[in-house]
Amino acid sequence: MLRTFETNYLREVTELSSSLWEFSPNEGKFQGKVYPVWVPCCWENLPDFSAYRGTGSFRKEFEAEGNVRLVFKGVSHTATVLVDGKEVGSHYNAYTPFSVMLKDLEPGVHKLEVIADNRFSEKSALHVPNDYMSYGGISRGVAMEELEGAYIEYIHAVPEKTEKGWNVKLAVKVVNLEDAEKIVELQVAIDGLFEITKEVNLKAGEEVLVEEIVDAGTPEVWEMDHPVLYTICAVLSDADGAFDDLADRIGFREIRTTGKDILLNGKKLRIKGFCRHEDHPMYGCALPVSAIEQDLQIVKDLGANSIRTSHYPNDEIFLDLCDEQGILVWEENHARGLVLEQMQNPNFEPQAEACIQEMITAHINHPSIIIWGILNECASDTEYGYECYKKQYDLIKKLDTSRPRSSASCRFKTDICFGLPEIVSYNLYPEWYHDTPASEYVPDIYNWVQTGSEGAGKPFLVTEIGAGAIYGYRNQNMCKWTEEYQAKALENQITAVLNQEGCSGIYIWQFCDVRISNEWFSNRPRTMNNKGIVDEYRRRKLSYDVVKRLYHSYPDFR
Ligand code: ADA
């Protein structure tokens, strides 16, 4: 399953994931051994490969002919794609989708091989030893599409509030696969709201972006407690009739900032959220829908209204579920704690900017996404860092003007980038990494922003705050790592943040305990980040009931 709804009725699409493939490591003592695996799959979940850093081949046969497009929602972390033994594509970064076009494929059965590589090296500026795990494998869905002479690559449909209702800013990308000019008819519609038809002249091999602002009348608004979704369909036709189609979903909601407030449909939002890694002891980062859904049920039980996809774009199925359930999302490009030297890796900027381009191109229609984030805790206190942040914020603005931008900083009173985004965000750990009471530390940082930075007068978010606890470690002495200590620290932290005047909300670090890279941080007990309010098996710690009580006691709007 790649989405929670049908995206094509005309186009022939075959899911290649949700099935058995063959896996073989390409190095190490099991090199060449063949294992049956169910894809999506992280090899770390195979008994012999729990700490395997290397390359591995995933093989599958498929039957097709003509113009065939292979769609990969995520391969961790670098993919090389071969068909019938010939390299046909590659991609860096586990967390964004990519596709490979095979033109005029001979009829018959073909051999697909995906080589995944999870090694660390200078070539990889974003996947580095870190406080989360870079897994190896085909971690998200794979599909095979059999296309005609032209196809619809994407529909971007961004709702805009107007005096009398709503418009939709449309951008539909149409691709001509033939070596001859093609005239096609493009029809785009949302049942009951609008329908437009345009003739599109496609030169040989040309890609065309068909743009239009259409009046969508007065649709039902997407709200957290009433997340109404509309299906938008695009159809390509020629003299012989309709031959390609694509459907997506949108929600009519407005997110904007004014003064120190974040307004969702004109109301002052209070974010009560969690930072969540895509991580599970049974699946690695390849969580099935059932596991994602279980996490969302827990998030809602806790009274939370938002999830921050720390620290990378998430599987689109997660976003589909958030769209359907009215859960707000801060989605960010892939980066965690890269110091200046790491940002100066020549691969850093192109890889970070490619991640933004791919993230927004793929996810722009999701109403649940309310904030685009970048560069978690990178070197935003340096001139070079400032240039990188500016380029990436500018790129987001070029791709999508409908959402505010931000970045989670840990550069406390030295950050020089707060003049760039719409929202100022901080990761703070009073009562964990230092013993300053949260009730003193949060106002101190907030006041510095208002008096000592270019972030003055902007919305202010705490994008990380929390403490560690080892599940099952109970001790009335309440020393650090006990569940009792974490519960007390979170009580103080959440109260300090949500009572802070001018603060628009909080993301607790973090939802669940997660695996970290063995190579990173020896002083993480269990080689895990243990700051979850549930452990990796989603078993509740004492802090669960504290967070639940507090989150339910603060309304979603200020
Ligand atoms: C940072 C970082 C998180 C995590 C956290 C921690 O804020 O953004 O990914 O590493 O610290 O647990 O210390």
Image (spheres, helix red, strand yellow):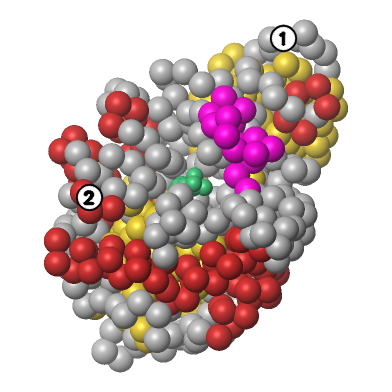
Furthest-front residue in this view: 477
Dot 2 falls on a residue whose secondary structure is loop
Q: Which of 56 and 544 is in front in this view?
A: 544
Q: Is residue 35 left or right of residue 75?
A: right
**Quadrant holding the C terminus:** bottom left
Q: Residue 523 magenta-drawn?
A: yes
- Mark 2: few, some, or many residues within 10 Å (few <14, many ≥20)? some
User: Compared to 345, does 69 lie above or below?
Assistant: below
Q: Can residue 384 be seen in this view?
A: yes
- Region in magenta: 515-531
Q: Where is residue 433 in the image (x, y as percent from the top left)?
A: 45, 50
Q: Earlier in the sequence, mark 1 or mark 2?
A: 1
Q: Is residue 404 visible?
A: no
**Residue underneath mark 2:** 415
Dot 1 falls on a residue whose secondary structure is loop
Q: Where is residue 14 in the image (x, y as percent from the top left)?
A: 71, 44
Closer to us: mark 1 or mark 2? 2
Q: Residue 217 magenta-drawn?
A: no
- Mark 1: few, some, or many residues within 10 Å (few <14, many ≥20)? few
Q: In this view, does 327 lie to the left or right of 373?
A: right
- What's the residue type where badge 2 is placed? Asp
Tell me the quarter of the picture where residue 241 sits. Answer: bottom right
Q: Residue at x 56, y 20 (%)?
A: 119
